[in-house]
Amino acid sequence: MIELSKDIFEYLTSLYGSESALAYKAYIQTEHTTYLRKKKNYSSENLINDLSEYGITVQQEPEIPDAYKIIKGENAAGKTIQHITGKYYIQSLSSMVPAMVLDPKEKDVVLDLCAAPGSKTTQLSDLMGNKGTLISNEISVDRVKMLVHNIDRMNVINIGVLNHKGELLSKVYSNYFDKILVDAPCSALGVLQKKQEVSSWWNEERVAVIASIQLKLLIAAIKMLKPGGELVYSTCTLTPEENEIIVNTVLRKYPVEAAVIEFPLESHEGFTSYKNERLHPDLKKAKRILPWQVDSEGFFVVKLRKTSETETNGSNTGKVSGLSFISSDHKSIRGHLAELSDAYGIHNTVWNGYKYLAKGTDLFFTAESWNDSDLSSFTRVGTRFGSIGKNNKLQLHPFAVQYFSDEIKENIYFVKDKNELRNYLAGGIIRTSAEPGTLKAVKYRDIMLGTAVPVHNGLKSQFPKSKRMQEIIL
């Protein structure tokens, strides 16, 4: 049972009234409802049928087309083959709304300012069709690792990962982005049901400290947004100090206006007055989700549109010599790509839709439309395409094999049974006859798992170590 602190209960009572405070208290004692978001290219029929084999029953949420409520078997949802290969992401229903409201398109230049662990970044990429330019920033090194793990799991390629203080990023970019998501760190009153520790530390003094960071992040985002560009500010908390008060400040001081948004879940207009202070009237266009009303997390969401330029304090320039993209017809990789086409039956025009980045013997790839002027500042651009071995052969990375699964027509090993599958997922050897040569693509049913190296007694798994660390139910 979650002990709700006196500070939180009294605060919510003063804000929403005793009836709502009691409803909140009752809600956080209920069992957390689990939702998932499927990728757009994964059909609803396949999702339902695949999960049923694990004893998982899901129900589509009509308000959000790719969202599903897990009715039965939630403990298995993070341990399926489909989960580990990025067919879906476990994410709360409310958490899916900010990216939907931002609504990025494939030609946009998009920033996710506070990106880890990656639920919204991977959703933004899916909405963009894995095209365009998506830049995801995270201040914490440890959380960057988590972000990259989820980017890889979800086969995101239109991505550049930054490890930077978000409030200082406007010194690098100015009037630059078409769309920005600021899902700011907050006091988490909307997610206390699953983060019980919030109750032990929450107080209004801590809220004030967090609010000062949120304001800096939002101001930086406004400076980085193009005139005419759109920004979504969201938090998973219920306090006006972290929501309306922050937005009120920028509406009065910066060239932005609030936009009317279509909202898929039950919600309430933002406050236009608080503690006897009249706030900007545009705040009625903001939306607040109360968790006890939607059986999901509490959220605040507002969309802002930039009306004119802000003072330039970023360069948006500075290409670093020796670190730049190459195209598929570049002499250094043209022959390697032709060999891959022959080996896997991939039409040679497929490679033209991407750009490539060489780092030593490793090759990364991203969307052909992805672009930024200074590649040196990124922790990661795109995802791994392959590496050139001692024999001067380019071997496809398992992430690339998964990404190009629909294009690969030849040199595929189909896993015969669950014993072979178990061996492969554990990094072992599938006992079979195999001719030495090119890596095999390995497929289980309709899921491309990765690659395997032909050895004298079979196929040695190249299933990524990062994915082997997770429990998978067979």
Image (tube, grey):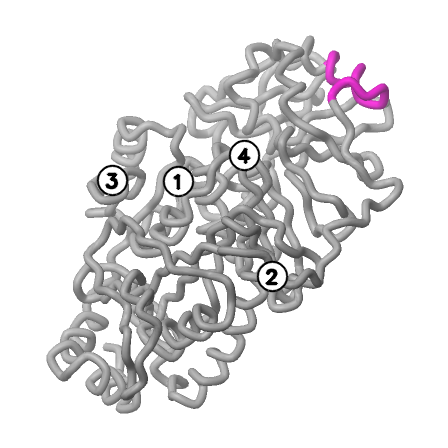
Amino acid type at circle 2 is Thr
Which residues are the magenta region? 328-339
Q: Residue at x 24, y 89 (%)?
A: 10
Mark on residue 107? 4
- Residue contact at pointers 2 and 3, CB within 8 angstroms: no
Q: CA distance from mark 2 to mark 3?
A: 54 Å
Sequence-earlier tag: 2 or 3 = 3
- Identify residue for label 1: 88
- Residue contact at pointers 1 and 4, CB within 8 angstroms: no
Q: Is residue 173 left or right of residue 420?
A: right
- Residue contact at pointers 4 and 3, CB within 8 angstroms: no
Q: Residue at x 25, y 40 (%)?
A: 55
Amino acid type at circle 3 is Gly
Q: CA distance from mark 3 to mark 1?
A: 17 Å
Disc 2 secondary structure class: loop
Q: Is residue 66 left or right of residue 99?
A: left
Sequence-earlier tag: 4 or 2 = 4
Q: Quadrant of residue 68?
A: top left
Amino acid type at circle 4 is Lys
Disc 1 secondary structure class: strand
Asked whether 216 or 278 is in front, the reply is: 278
Sequence-earlier tag: 1 or 2 = 1
Q: Nearer the viewer, mark 1 or mark 4?
A: 4
Residue 344, given in percent of the width and then of the height, sits at: 63, 13
- Identify residue for label 2: 310
Sequence-earlier tag: 3 or 1 = 3
How would you rate the neighbour count of disc 4 (Cα within 10 Å): few for under 14, some for 14-19, many for 20 or more? some
Asked whether 137 or 78 is in front, the reply is: 137
Regarding residue 461, the answer to whether it shows in the image is no
Mark on residue 55? 3
Mark on residue 405? none
Residue 288, given in percent of the width and then of the height, sits at: 27, 65
